[in-house]
Each structure stands twice: as structure tokens, then as C-alpha cells.
Image (cartoon, rainbow, N blue to C red):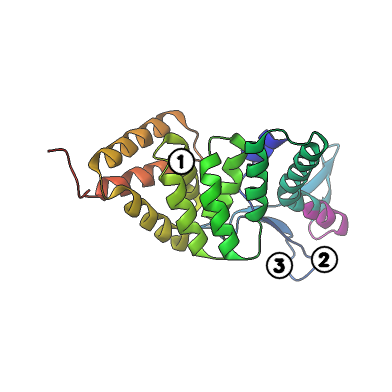
Amino acid sequence: MADRIEAASAGAWIPVLETRGATGRASCIRIAPATAVDDDEIHLSRFINGEQVQVSPDSQLDADLDFIASARQDMPRLIAEVRRLRGLLKGDSDPRHAAFVALRELGRSQDYRDRADAGRGLAAFADMPEAHGPLLELVLDPGDTFVTRVTAEAVLRRKDRIGLTVVASAMAVANPNHSDWIHTAIVDVFSIFSADRDRAMQLCEEILRDTDDRVAPGARQLHDVLAEIDPVLRPA
């Protein structure tokens, strides 16, 4: 289930339904409207024996669209709750996992300061596969770009492929406002030592060779930003 969620288009998915308001008689699911550059929508029709039997607007079809769209947000929460309860049942003898769970929950706070603290803390857990989604959400925080900047900076200060991949994934779908603050974080981290900048560029080239089409555009952008930086300290 977690693998299918990770493979799906990034959230949030927003149901836009004719039964809730005028949509031009075309209900749909909007994909990540806060970060999409162009309209990105899913429309749904139903066919039985090759014959179209439902097309928007239709109350049953709208209910199905609402279910599909909500699942993109509901399923990660459900999985997180199952893991939390399993941890409680077994006493969660792994302190590292318990700390990760606590930080992930902090990242869902309504207070931007809590989310920023969660971003800083979760950067240390970026090597855990389940941390990628929460970190990506914080880098693309829809409520406050302060969270974007501090989370991006924290994962970049890992100066490893994992941190660069998180930022590249965010850059691939970021809107201009988020992109500006991610750019600031990149400059802050890699403008001092040329060795750090050069190593990061090398890792970006590896990501470009090995990653899928969803991350590659962001890795290319990240590489271009790094190439523009003129570090203060170079080898003698």
C-alpha cells in the first residue's frame, strides 16, 4: 500500500464536483493544484460492456470521484495510524522509529513553527523510506514558505544523495514561490566550500542517470542552480 501511494501523483488531490457547485458540468479531480504549473485533472466515466453508462455530472460518479480523491490524503494517514498503533502494541522498542513517528506527527501541526521544527528533525531520518513523503510535504508546505526554507536547508546539509533527491523531487513540482525559497536554501548550504558544491553536482548527475522521469526534471534544475554558485573557499 505504501509503495502504491509513493508511486501515485503527488497530492493533494482535490475533488471538484458538480453536485457541490457549478464546475462547467464536468466533475474532476485536480492534482496538486497548489504546485501544478498547468491544469492537471482526472475525469471519470463508467462503461459497461463497452457502453458508456455514466458521465459527469452524475451523483454516483461524483461520489466515486470524491472517494478516489480523498483516498490520496486518507490512505497515508490510515497507514500512519496503523503503524502508530502497532508501535504501541509492541511497545515500540525501536527508539529511532518512535522519534520519527513523533516528528512526523509534529509535521502535521497547524503551527508553522512546529512544522519547521519537524522538518529540521526529520532531515536526520531521511534515510528511512517512510520519511521521504513527510519531508517532501514539508518542503512544499502550502501554509508557510519558512517551513520550505528550513526543511530544504536541513535535508541539503546532509550533503548526500538522499537529501538531494528529496529536494530534487520537490523542485520537480514546486511552484515559483516554493522554488525561490528552495533556491535560497541551496545557495546557503553550498556557497562556502567548493568541494561540497562539486560533490553535490556529481550526485545530481548520478540521480539524473538513475532516477525516474518524476525526479529527473528537479535534479536537472538542482544541478543548474549548483553550477551557478561561486563558492567562497576553494582548494589552495
Cα separation between marks 1 and 3? 42 Å
Q: Which residues are magenta?
A: 56-66
Label number found at residue 19? 2
Label 2 or label 3, whichever lies nearer to me, is: 2
Name the amino acid, label 2: Thr
Kind of element beneath mark 2: loop
- The mark that comes first in sequence, 1 or 3, is 3
Label 1 or label 3, whichever lies nearer to me, is: 1
Cα separation between marks 1 and 2? 43 Å
Q: Assess disc 2: are there few (<14), some (14-19) or many (≥20) residues with their C-alpha within 10 Å of its C-alpha.
A: some
The reply to whether residue 120 is in sight is yes
Label number found at residue 163? 1
Q: Quadrant of the N terminus?
A: top right
The reply to whether residue 35 is in sight is no
Q: Does the magenta-highlighted stretch encompass residue 64?
A: yes
Residue 195 percent location from the top left of the image: 25, 38
Residue 42 percent location from the top left of the image: 68, 51
The residue under the point 60% across, 44% down is: 133
Q: Which residue is under mark 3?
A: 24
Residue 160 percent location from the top left of the image: 41, 36
Q: Assess disc 3: are there few (<14), some (14-19) or many (≥20) residues with their C-alpha within 10 Å of its C-alpha.
A: few
Kind of element beneath mark 3: loop
Q: Does the magenta-highlighted stretch encompass residue 42?
A: no
Name the amino acid, label 3: Gly
Name the amino acid, label 1: Gly
Return the residue found at the far top: 210
Kind of element beneath mark 1: helix
The residue under the point 74% across, 71% down is: 22
| Quadrant position of residue 208 | top left
- The mark that comes first in sequence, 2 or 3, is 2
Residue 199 percent location from the top left of the image: 31, 35
